[in-house]
Image: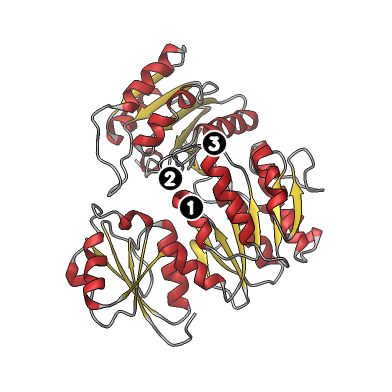
Amino acid sequence: MNKKQNHYFLIGICGISMSGLAKILQKQGHIVSGSDLKKCEIEKVESKIGHETKNIIKNIDEIIYTSAVEDKKSPGYIEIQKANELGIKTTKRSKFIGRMMNEKIGIAVTGMHGKTTTSTMISLILEKAGFDPTCLIGTEVREWKSNARFGRTKYFVVEACEYDRQMLDLRPKIALITNMEEEHLDTYKNGMKDIRQAFKKFVKLLPKNGLLVLCKDDKNVASLTKYAKCKVKYYSYKEPWPGLKLKIPGIYNLQNATGAARLCHEIGVSSDIIKKTLNNFDGAGRRCEILGEKNKVLVIDDYGHHPTEIKATLKGIKEKYPKKRLIVVYQPHQQQRTKLLFDKFVTSFDVADKIIMNKVYLIAGREKDTGENLAKKLSQKIKDRGNDIQYFDEYNEILKYLKKISKPNDLILTMGATDIFKVAKKYLNE
């Protein structure tokens, strides 16, 4: 990256990855500003609410935008148009991060599930080992109270999103792939065929002197070995890293920890530091995060929004808290995902004792309400299986119902890639 001070303007600055990028750029000494439909507070960064052409001024050196803004129907697209009129360079977020990686020893963690937890684990291990990495994570890391960390060395850990094939814009030297399955089918319209092809291309991006760490529990991931020109290492929950005694529940977290351990050990971190860091790890933000307890009711929040994630999380929680009544509050994320994976969602909640379903969360700029009320249909199908489920349109209705039915020794779990966690926090605070 250019060493002079630049002025970067981020369209969609409040998004989890964009806000992290803003923090890193600001720490590098650049001027950073941006816009979004919502309000967010980032230290020393001016964030405007709403997308308007007047936000784009001549002294901006470069515009960085998210995938959602590429759509001409997106509210933020008018700012890209204005930048083009003024001759200001515009760059997609993932391509910009790829440029940053060119100057770093990039470590990219990708896959359909487990990216956030695994990349957080890797980041904390490297930090504890004195590697002083720069990190860009898809959640708030409790130890930093931030989703980003600015380091002084060449190590750069990035949670690499597979949506819109964004991981193909990155240029890592080291990569870890957690799993592959049907997800983001608006991007991968031919399902697994397109997904396999995209990950094959990603593996081929790694240099000969690089490192690829693969989860061999997933046959699709393990099959990528033949496309790698660099060193390949494997991990499996069936062969957990020696000495792990995790605080967080679930086989999937043992799998994530083992992958993080394998990668860090390969680049020179001692097994003692790896074990100590992972055994003290109490989870990434919104990943089985314990929010608190009220009247002997334990409240946990989780980001899971794919059938596989939901099943694995509920199973892990039931194993850790077998005597508690599990009440799951779920908000579906995105109409297309809910529709395309509908049948899989129907069977995802079977271990829950009680389920509360909220309406589908619509992604601004990417979809409009089709009027199908998929969440209500999903609720009925789940009920037809004999599950105890209630549907509510609004958060305040859910909160009222929770207050009515909850009792000592219950466990309330809010789930979804939305702000459904607000229900849990209100329950605890009111």
Question: What separation in Å lies between label 3 and label 1 (alpha carbons)?
Answer: 20 Å
Which residue is pictured at 58% across the width and 44% down the height?
Answer: 196
- Residue 419 appears in the rendering: yes
Q: Disc 3 marks which residue?
A: 309
Element class at badge 2: loop
Which residue is pictured at 29% across the width and 54% down the height?
Answer: 71
Residue type of the residue flagged with mark 1: Arg
Mark 2, residues whose alpha carbon is within 10 Å: few (<14), some, or many (≥20)? some
Q: Earlier in the sequence, mark 3 or mark 2?
A: 2
Residue type of the residue flagged with mark 2: Thr
Is residue 288 toward the left or the right of residue 264 in the image? left
Q: Are marks 3 and 1 in contact (CB under 8 Å)?
A: no
Name the front one of labels 3 and 2.
Answer: 2
Q: Disc 1 marks which residue?
A: 165
Nearer to me, 39 or 231: 231
Q: Are marks 2 and 1 in contact (CB under 8 Å)?
A: yes
Q: Disc 2 marks which residue?
A: 187
Element class at badge 1: helix
Q: Are marks 3 and 2 in contact (CB under 8 Å)?
A: no
Q: Position of residue 115 (x, y in %)?
A: 57, 50
Nearer to me, 31 or 228: 228
- Residue 218 appears in the rendering: no
Question: What separation in Å lies between label 2 and label 1 (alpha carbons)?
Answer: 7 Å
What is the quadrant of the C terminus in the image? Answer: top left
Residue type of the residue flagged with mark 3: Glu
Q: Position of residue 391 (x, y in %)?
A: 33, 24
Is residue 386 toward the left or the right of residue 331 in the image? right
**289 to 39, vertically: above or below:** above
